[in-house]
Image (cartoon, coloured by chain):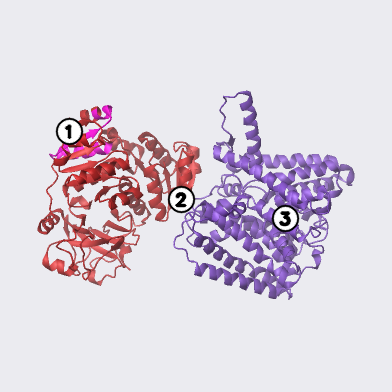
Chain colours: A purple, B red
Amino acid sequence: MNRRMIFYTLGKLLIALSALLVLPLAVSIYYKESCTLAFLITAAISLVMGLLLSKLLKPASHVIYAREGFAIVALVWLSMSAIGALPFVISGEIPSFADAFFETVSGFTTTGASILRDVESMSHGLLFWRSFTHWIGGMGVLVFVMALLPNVSDRSIHILRAEVPGPIVGKLVPRIKDTAKILYIIYIVLTVIQVIFLLAGGMSLFDSLLHAFGTAGTGGFSIKADGLAGYSPYLQWVIAIFMLIFGVNFNLYYFILIRKAKMAFQSRELWCYLGIVVVAVTAICINIYPMYENFAEVLRQAVFQVSSIITTTGYATTDFNLWPAFSKGVLFVLLFVGACAGSTAGGLKISRVMLVFKIIGREIRRLIHPRSVAKVKLEGKSVDEATLDGVTTYFAVYMIGIIATFLVLSAEPFGIETNFSAAVSCFNNVGPGFAGVGPMSSYADYSAFSKIVMSLAMLLGRLEIYPLLIVFIPSFWKKD
Amino acid sequence: MKIIVAGCGKIGTTIIASLSKEGHDIVALDISAKALEEITNIYDVMCICGASTDCNILSEAGVEQAELFVSVTGSDEINMLSCFLAKKMGAQNTISRIRSPHYNENSLGFVKQQLDLNVSINPEQMVARALYDILRFPSAVNIETFSARQFEMIELRLKPDSLFDGLSLAEIRKKYPGNYLIGMVQREDEIFIPDGNFVIRGGDKIGLTASPAEIQKLLKRLGLFQKQAKSVMILGASTTAYYLAKSLLATGHTVKIIDKDRERCEEISSQLPEAIVIYGDGAQQELLLEEGIATTDAFVSLTGIDEENILISIFANSLNVSKVITKVNRGELSTMAEKLGLETIVSPKKVVSDILSRHARAIQNSLGSNVERLYKLVDGRAEALEFKVTPDFEYQEVLLRDMKLKPNTLIAGIIRNKKPFIPSGNDFIMAGDRVVVLTAGQQMNDLSDIIR
């Protein structure tokens, strides 16, 4: 195992993180806030640690294998979350480290679950940092570093695979560095377009930026006590549509860019995704119709909530806790599904759900015709057995993870609905759950221990379990 | 430069390895997902699983923008068809592996023209050529030939008690005057492009450039000269063996080919009636002894299995066969074989990757192709290149001593009007010359790249 390379990459990442901290620092200076010092200290710590690691541990060889890829991703995300929590603690706005860690993990993993009771009292700098973590975590911070670093290792595909969610990770162009660049360019351009649309609707620049960060990363930290309920219908529509846009596989945008739009619209996953949205919206519309005055509002509420949950963003324009049980049930199922693979969303991912159903279908066929041979196909290509095994085991591990988290949370004095939806919501990086952790409440009442457990659940969900799981297994670190 | 490589077998993987090292954007195509998985894990290339004769797959690979399309699948016909399709769809240059003797001997020119192929490569024939060259100078470990065989670079392993031991290059030149140059020295794992003060030691592997006649003279003086091998025993009746035997027979050698496949034996015997073809298992020492391995001038092991080639070559070495050549495909095995005392190892992969690197550089060079030949030496850490000087070369008629060359770079020879000579500081380069350059650690696309 090439340990030096792992820590060397970690060092590089910390340097990048200190550079990213300059943005919230600038914001806090602009608003002349007391958290300026907190950002300065954190950036300095990150820079010094990064320089030490990358200078002292110059690796002899840049060769890495899959296991180093896993270790790099897991360590990077853990240390990034720990350092990212410092500004909250140092500034004293979130004094407990467990709380600040929860909030930061929730940011980086684009969950959007918050422990803040009164978000409007936070300083601008910290609010900016909180939402900015969504934006960084959405596309993946290592992908970002890969796009910038000169001569990345030939084998950094292992890092990409470990960080980018989805059952099959492919490249867009031959070089990994160029692939990372293209992804980030699409990401930045879409974010900027959203900001422009929000500004056009009369939202202030600060609010527009923060909401665009939250939407792009499919995070969903809101900066108002009532979520997005206070904004105009136009702004709510803009955010709803952009949430859906960021839930689409980014490869499809690339196809459109290189004028192969036909290929993009042939994607089965895309149609399945849109199909699920339409069905869910229709079902909820019928169910909640009596609650609102006119159809326009019903449609808006249904579309907003559905796209918010399926893309695992977690913004809310209304307290859907008050909706009838059927609508809540539909949203609960959507918590699991998640959006397309290769997007910034969390959850199981549509393509994985599609594969699970195809595997079930094949199994049933096999029971009827025991000698039948059938290849499972996705997007017109047959999927090899190793990937299918990966999907089924992932599904099993994922369920075990959710149940284990739920079991730990059950020690808390809340109802099953609260605890279970909190576990599911954290694991799928959605944010809000139901009952006690609904869209208008917060996770503040949980104990510090439970918050740490939920933070780990969020990281497990974001990194798709294995990278984080593996580094806790002793034999992984053994010399061999 | 964007390059598509169709077929990720042994040859394809080697091509991908050497081209990705040179910094090209590579898309790899194969019908086997397994072969591709290995490749994405090791090299920074994009892999697409599918048939290279499928237009959709080709378009997915971006054939429209490809500057070079290389098809090296196992089938000649697939290679030709995919190159044809690629060219029609917009690839600028196509290289196809065509290895069957039917095509190569009868219809290659016509096929190439009709398919608009830029280059066809025949690894078996190229390997056979390399083997043939070594058999002409059995004391060499390796030979690279430059333009029209007027100029060669031979690699020699010096014995510990060699006459060169302890002499600097300047002293060697005084003691053994002649029109030759020691352009490269490999000592253990290090490689040097030496100057006059460099002291040679026994055990070094030296690269010597000169015309064939000069080389012969020098080898005679050093007492290293071995007669050309007259009788050659070849193990394994592969296509390479066929090409090698054919050129050996044409120049009056006696050739004995051993193979354990009856059909193959019959086939090669009908193609080469003058060769003695033995049907039997070459792994049996008894059989080899019976067929006179102990008295043959040279033994060439060309079976399809590296390990078998290595073991049988060690056996031949132990019988003091004067020249033993081993074909080894896998890189890691060839270093091991060298440690086991096998000196002359020929790798088909290297031969192919050399030729592809050359084409890739020639295409990349905007001034038009002027890399005429390229050989990678010592695992690609050094290179010998031959450039043709175009009229727009900037440093024409500048004395070599006034040219500031990059470090570890040497002008090893100039061929002017088909006459090779070793240049001194008072010589210069003219348009129309062919210049042989030795370099370590530099990538050269153009002759002007030698200037600092």
Residue at the disc numbered 1: B275
Disc 3 residue type (three-letter):
Met
Disc 1 residue type (three-letter):
Ala
**Chain at numbered mark 2:** B
Which numbered disc, 1 or 3, marks the residue closer to the eye? 3
Q: Do the residues marked 1 and 3 share a common chain?
A: no
Contact flag, marks 3 and 2 (Cβ < 8 Å): no
Expressed as whole percent of the image width and height from the top left, the position of residue A132 reads 68, 62
What is the quadrant of residue A82 in the picture? bottom right
The part of the chain drawn in magenta is B239-265
Exactly how many numbered labels are in the figure? 3
Expressed as whole percent of the image width and height from the top left, the position of residue A368 reads 63, 24
Residue at the disc numbered 2: B42
Neighbor class of circle 2 (other Cα within 10 Å; few <14, some 14-19, many 20+) is some
Q: Is residue B243 left or right of residue A422?
A: left
Disc 2 residue type (three-letter):
Ile
Taking depth in this image into account, of B77 and A473 the one nearest to the observer is A473
Residue at the disc numbered 3: A454
Q: Is residue B313 left or right of residue B161?
A: right
